[in-house]
Image (cartoon, rainbow, N blue to C red):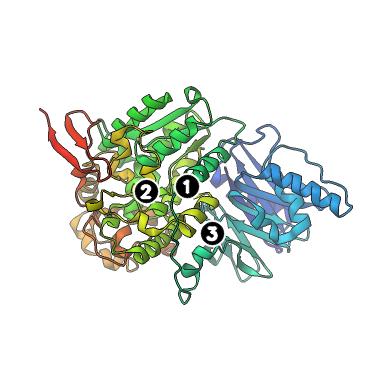
């Protein structure tokens, strides 16, 4: 994981290109604290801030392919890079050409020989999370691409003068060009073709073309566990070790269980964040105990959390309140993990694939379920994945997400019947019931059947309301009365929203189009059905998140439904 920057401007002399490339790449130093590299060619400069994970000593970037002089910057990981190397050798031999020679064991280097052989089609060969820019020596032939889910960020900027820029974060583009946009996930771009969608599985077609009929799969979940285990195995690729973000929820617990089948867990560091005796802290302790990880916690206070909001918004590059609430504890979590390791495995994505959010309790049927899970998956790059990437990279930490492996996406959306994702307490089915059943008896009971909590909820059941109160105290009534006048685009509805918006404008004024705003102010607002579970202010009833692993709480969680029996707090 790294930060990448690319500048194409034929009007600038080489010295100015190099100076500007280094200056703007330096803004990404938090993403790559190990070293910064720069390559300047005819009318272009490539910059790379490196977090050394694969081939730490030899995998410097930008990379240059000696036979062609093509240059590359890459952010992310290519999990099938060994297969790609073998494929390039086999292709060269079949063509009667000299086999490519590799100078490093970096996964990034595998891209260049195949690009020389296959051109833009190389993008569809990559299995991983990535943002790449390739420049040919003429400075005019360019390929940029982003992974299918948008796990890795990328922005593009341009001006009428002919300048084009690419960067991992928005802060490198502000003030450097006339137009800018987020690079769409699952696409590549060249000056000749513009954007081309290379990731187009059949299950995604209804999202891409609403006129096409929605085909509902009718299969079971029999293959899910094996596919997910293989996805976890891929993501254990590292020359510097790895850890685990352990929220105490179902998804990270499943990842922990599968890791225990693949590696020695006594050598794995796990990390959790929250307030004292919070649902996440207490559940994570139980998981770490069961699987024997070397477990670390960070307990934060509301005052400490409020104080870090400006830093969170600077790195997150948004003012969307639901996302910021989750990103604040994620900032502390990444800081903790980043002080111990460079790589962590996470459970992100499971709620989109298997309908984990509590508003799905009101989903009326199979078709609505399929459409809604696809809708929120399509927004992941602007929400959960943006949080995971930006908070991690603020502390030089790479987060890997096995639930978003493309093979698992195909299974979850193309084969598993959405009826299996429906919540039906009468039939003993709570949120993510089908996924939970695959691990029945293998996880601690209270964790396996624990009620879904988003990170801003699991770190403390009353934490969001405390945060909102602190935001309200920081915004004068007179300022809030003029909110719509000051912020005519997406005007704030509360003092909390106003506070975030004012901080955003300190760095990114006029960049509203890069902020994903949920309809109705929350994720559930865009669903085709009504639900009272979530509001603009967050989860309506946080008391349902308490569980029997918390001190002072006596509860028995019912398998299947997740109902709490005899819930009471002792003095």
Q: Which of 559 and 141 is in front in this view?
A: 559
Q: Residue 147: image x %, image y %? A: 57, 54
Vertical comparison of 404 with 304: above or below: below
Reading the image, the residue beneath label 2 is 434
Cα distance, mark 3 to mark 2? 28 Å
Q: Which residue is drawn at 37% across and 62% down?
A: 372
Q: Nearer the viewer, mark 1 or mark 3?
A: 1
Q: Are marks 1 and 3 in contact (CB under 8 Å)?
A: no
In the rendered view, does 209 fall on the left or right side of 48? left
Quadrant of the rendered structure where residue 363 is? bottom left
Q: Residue 562: image x %, image y %? A: 25, 43
Question: Is residue 76 among the parts visible in the rendering?
Answer: yes
Q: Residues within 10 Å of mark 3 (few under 14, many from 20)?
A: many
Quadrant of the rendered structure where residue 55 is? top right
Q: Which residue lies furthest to the bottom in this view?
A: 211
Q: Residue 46: image x %, image y %? A: 67, 51
Which circle's residue, 3 or 2, is located before the other in the chain? 3
Q: Residue 377: image x %, image y %? A: 43, 57
Q: Which residue lies furthest to the left in this view?
A: 571
Q: Which of 514 and 12 is in front in this view?
A: 514
Q: Nearer the viewer, mark 3 or mark 2?
A: 2
In the rendered view, does 571 fall on the left or right side of 487? left
Reading the image, the residue beneath label 1 is 224
Secondary structure category for the residue under label 3:
loop
Which circle's residue, 1 or 3, is located before the other in the chain? 3
Q: Quadrant of the C terminus?
A: top left
Reading the image, the residue beneath label 3 is 185
Which circle's residue, 1 or 2, is located before the other in the chain? 1
> Which numbered tag is attached to residue 215?
none
Cα distance, mark 1 to mark 2? 10 Å
Cα distance, mark 1 to mark 3? 24 Å
């Amino acid at each position: 994981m790294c930060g990448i920057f690319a500048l194409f401007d034929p009007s600038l002399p080489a010295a100015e290109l190099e100076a500007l490339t280094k200056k703007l790449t330096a803004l990404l130093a938090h993403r790559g604290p190990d070293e910064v590299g720069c390559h300047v060619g005819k009318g272009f400069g490539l910059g790379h801030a490196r977090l050394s994970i694969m081939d730490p000593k030899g995998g410097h970037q930008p990379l240059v392919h000696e036979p062609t002089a093509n240059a590359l910057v890459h952010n992310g990981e290519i999990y099938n890079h060994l297969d790609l190397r073998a494929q390039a050798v086999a292709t060269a031999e079949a063509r009667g050409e000299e086999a490519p020679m590799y100078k490093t064991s970096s996964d990034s280097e595998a891209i260049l020989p195949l690009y020389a052989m296959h051109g833009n089609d190389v993008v569809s060969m990559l299995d991983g999370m990535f943002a790449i820019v390739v420049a040919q020596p003429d400075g005019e032939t360019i390929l940029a691409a982003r992974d299918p889910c948008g796990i890795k960020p990328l922005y593009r900027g341009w001006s009428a003068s002919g300048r084009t820029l690419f960067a991992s974060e928005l802060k490198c583009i502000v003030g450097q060009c006339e137009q800018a946009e987020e690079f769409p996930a699952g696409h590549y771009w060249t000056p000749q073709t513009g954007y081309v969608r290379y990731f187009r599985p059949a299950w995604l077609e209804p999202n891409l073309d609403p006129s096409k009929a929605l085909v509902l799969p009718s299969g079971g979940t029999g293959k899910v566990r094996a596919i997910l285990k293989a996805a976890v195995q891929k993501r254990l690729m590292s020359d510097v070790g790895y850890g685990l973000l352990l929220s105490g929820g179902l998804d990270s617990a499943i990842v922990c269980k599968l890791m225990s089948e693949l590696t020695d867990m006594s050598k794995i560091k796990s990390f959790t964040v929250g307030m004292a005796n919070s649902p996440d802290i207490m559940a994570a302790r139980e998981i770490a105990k069961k699987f024997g990880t070397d477990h670390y916690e960070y307990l934060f206070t509301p005052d400490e959390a409020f104080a870090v909001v400006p830093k969170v918004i600077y790195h997150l590059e948004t003012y969307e309140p639901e996302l910021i609430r989750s990103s604040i504890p994620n900032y502390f979590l990444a800081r903790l993990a980043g002080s111990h390791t460079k790589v962590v495995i996470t459970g992100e994505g499971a709620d989109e694939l298997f309908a984990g959010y509590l508003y799905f309790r009101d989903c009326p049927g199979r078709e609505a379920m399929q459409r809604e899970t696809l809708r929120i998956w399509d927004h992941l790059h602007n929400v959960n994945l943006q949080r995971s990437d930006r908070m991690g990279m603020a502390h030089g930490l790479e987060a890997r997400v096995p639930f978003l492996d493309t093979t698992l996406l195909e299974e979850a959306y193309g084969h598993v019947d959405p009826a299996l994702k429906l919540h039906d307490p009468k039939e003993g089915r709570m949120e993510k019931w089908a996924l939970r059943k695959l691990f029945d008896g293998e996880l601690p009971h209270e964790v396996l059947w624990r009620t879904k909590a988003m990170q801003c909820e699991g770190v403390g059941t009353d934490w969001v309301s405390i945060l909102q109160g602190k935001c309200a105290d920081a915004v004068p009534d007179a300022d809030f009365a003029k909110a719509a006048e000051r912020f005519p685009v997406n005007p704030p509805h509360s003092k909390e929203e106003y506070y975030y918006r004012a901080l955003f404008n300190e760095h990114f004024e006029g960049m509203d189009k890069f902020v994903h705003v949920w309809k109705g102010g929350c994720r559930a607002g865009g669903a085709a059905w009504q639900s009272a579970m979530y509001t603009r202010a967050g989860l309506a009833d946080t008391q349902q998140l308490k569980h029997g692993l918390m001190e002072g709480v006596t509860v028995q969680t019912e398998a299947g439904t997740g109902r709490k029996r005899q819930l009471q707090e002792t003095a």
